[in-house]
Image (cartoon, rainbow, N blue to C red):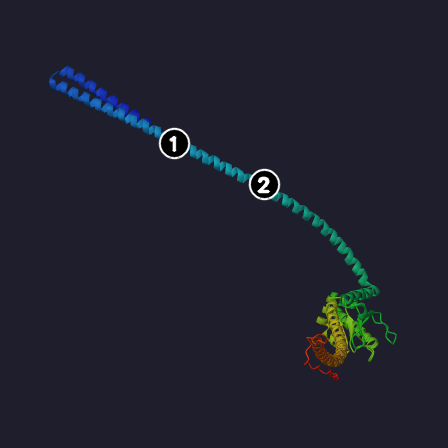
Amino acid sequence: MTETILIAVLCLLAGAGIAALVVHLMRARADDTSDEARAEIADLARQHGDTAARLEAMIGMLGKGQSQLQHAVNERLDHVTHRVQQTMTDNTEKTIEQFQSVQERLAVIDVAQNSISELTKNAHKGMADLTTQVSALHGVLANKQTRGAFGQRQMEAILQDGLTKNQYELQYTLKSGKRPDCVVFLPDQRPLVIDAKFPLESITMFRECKTDDERKVAVQRVRQDVMKHVSDIAERYIVPGETQDTALMFVPSESVYADLHDSFSEVVEKAYRAQVMIVSPTLLMLAIQVIRQIQKDAQMREAADHIRTEVGHIMKDIKLLGDRVRKLQTHFGQTSEDLNNILISTGKIEKRAGNIEGLEFDGEDAPSNVIPTPIRKLEAGE
């Protein structure tokens, strides 16, 4: 566009010059036809020719510049078009990838949502089952007999996990005819008595009391119930010379055990002085581990005594074996000496046999001066 404007301007300038020249020539013809006028006209004509040549040169240069500019513009447009197309292609590919990624994430979200829905259903079902089980457990714990059976089963499960069947016995009968829930046999042959007690009713009353009067009544009942269990265990199941001097009162609930220790420490101390240890499931497991280690140590001591006895027998056998080896060595020495003597006698016999073999008894060549060697009687040992 700029080059076109320049060409138009140059054309206007050239037209204006030509017009001025024509006017000037017309005036010269009208006014003066002298040599000076003709010289001026010739000079103007020459200038006009130079101007026209310059104009043509500028027009050529402008055309060449316009062609180069057009070529550069076309190349630039091609490059820009290629970049735009490449950018559009890359953006399209990225958009497709992002769309696919979004689809995959949506699929994952759908799966997770389905899993959450399934888990929610299972949770509701589990909550319903848990509610049923809690209701059943509440029904079990509400009855004293079923509550006692629950504590015995829990105690039995702990014993089965920690001991072998020959190391404990359920419902063991003492000489007095009393039958504790369980006894554990210790190395000194005196069983350790374990009895399960579950003072749930009094503890529940203590937890649910709201006034000070109710609290006093609940505290007094808990103390009475627990001390009643402790006294029964101490009187019935601690028999000097037959059982251990200490018995265990198993409370099959960590929360009940915690309440006893937190709020009724004096009851726990009285039980301790009565040689009755109150234990929770965790403490019973710990006690079973200690008992198992004690039994293992006793077995190792018995095994060590047996090993010591066997080692003594082995030492006696080794001493007897040494005596026999030394006697055998003596026999071997005598035999070796006898063999050496036999070999000496054999060598002498072979030597004499060689001398005899070298004698010649017939013919003229027999030596007359050979004195026969007298035969010597062999001595004993030769």
Q: Which residue is mark 2?
A: 100
Residue furthest to the right in view is: 177
Residue 157 image position (x, y, % from top left): 78, 65
Assign a secondary structure to mark 1.
helix
One can see residue 210 in this view: no
What's the mark number on residue 239? none
Say which residue appears at 78% left-offset and 57% top-offset: 133
Q: Which quarter of the rendered picture does the C terminus lie within?
A: bottom right
Q: Is residue 67 above or below residue 217?
A: above
- What type is the residue that disc 1 sits on? Val
**Left or right relative to 211: residue 88:** left
Crowding at mark 1 (Cα within 10 Å: few <14, some 14-19, many 20+): few
Q: Is residue 381 above or below residue 39?
A: below
Assign a secondary structure to mark 2.
helix
Q: Which residue is mark 1?
A: 73
Crowding at mark 2 (Cα within 10 Å: few <14, some 14-19, many 20+): few
Which corner quadrant of the image does residue 207 belong to?
A: bottom right
| Marked residue nearer the N-terminal end (1 or 2) | 1
Residue 348 image position (x, y, % from top left): 70, 79
Nearest the viewer among 312 and 164 is 312
